[in-house]
Image (cartoon, rainbow, N blue to C red):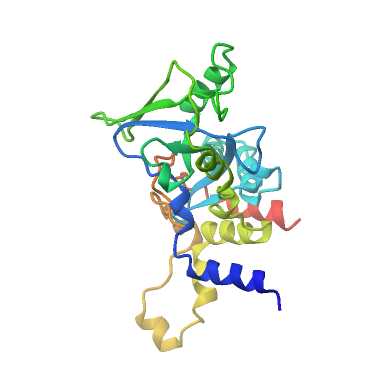
Amino acid sequence: MNINAIKQRLNSLQNTSKKTDSLWKTKPGKYQVRIVPYKFNKENPFIELLFHYNINNKTYLSPASFGRPDPILEFAEKLKKLGDTENWKAGKKMEPKLRTFAPVVIRGQENEGTKFWGFGKTVYQEILAIVADPDYGDITDEKNGRDIVIEIVEEAGKTYPETRIRVKPNVSLLHDNAATATKLLEDQTDITEIYSELSYAELKTVLENWLNPTAAVEEENPTPSVTQQTLAPQPKKVEEQLTEIPGVGIGSLPNDLPWDDETAAPAPKVDVAAAFDDLFNS
């Protein structure tokens, strides 16, 4: 018997922490953090992921994040080529949006371990500009890196809080205890364990159900008897349902971070059904 394997399994069953515990849940206020090297890619701490927002009121990780085919993205491109403004806008909205993550240690909360900080394009560009500046360089270095002061500010009239960043002028240690520093660097979660990727076939089914919700409902519920059909409200035609595709909301993935541009994609025009068949069934 492999005793070590048994112990590992026991530990995994006893561990009640959630995967989303590794996400830093920001709130309005001021914080000081240290970006650290990503254990699973030590050459680059910035993890760029693409997400589809509000597809069936859920958010899905795009396989395009890893250079793999994405049926929703393919369909979006198909829509944009149909030649009219409405379908082009619908296709544009269906394209995955970028969200960048970096492993960080929150000062004063080092005992909670390394977490992932998620941010949008503007903050990402600011951080990259800092790293590219020779006066700063590698701010993630364990011994000669620099902390970042982050201020989350809520302003009236804005949908999401504003994130302001400032790099500390002096270099510092990740932690004055070498063992703790090593633990912060090594005890990291692979981000793909938090944001799981569906297969091409699974995402295609998600897209089909979104475009034709009637078919998805009928598959789950067999055709009722004649009496039931008479008494029950009749389902709307696909043409009508396509104009009522659900809007705001994030379901299958954590939603504690302020996502960029997560407004719902406008309902594609009726002829998307033909476009879908042309793309996937030819």
Give the quarter of the figure containing the C terminus. Answer: bottom right
Return the residue nearer the eye: 191 or 268: 191
Give the quarter of the figure containing the N terminus. Answer: bottom right
Q: Residue 110: image x %, image y %? A: 42, 41
Q: Extreme left residue here?
A: 156
| Residue in the image at 54% along x and 34% along y | 36
Image side of residue 203 versus residue 235, left or right: right
Instruction: Report if residue 253 is visible in the image.
Output: no
Return the residue nearer the eye: 227 or 161: 161
Q: Is residue 119 above or below residue 75?
A: above
Q: Extreme right residue here?
A: 282
| Residue in the image at 53% along x and 24% along y | 145
Q: Residue 72: image x %, image y %? A: 61, 49
| Residue in the image at 46% along x and 53% along y | 20
Q: Residue 16: image x %, image y %? A: 44, 65
Instruction: Report if residue 226 is visible in the image.
Output: yes
Image side of residue 74 versus residue 270, left or right: right
Return the residue nearer the eye: 191 or 91: 191
Q: Residue 167: image x %, image y %? A: 44, 20
Q: Is residue 139 above or below residue 254?
A: above
Image side of residue 198 versus residue 103, left or right: right
Q: Is residue 228 above or below residue 35?
A: below
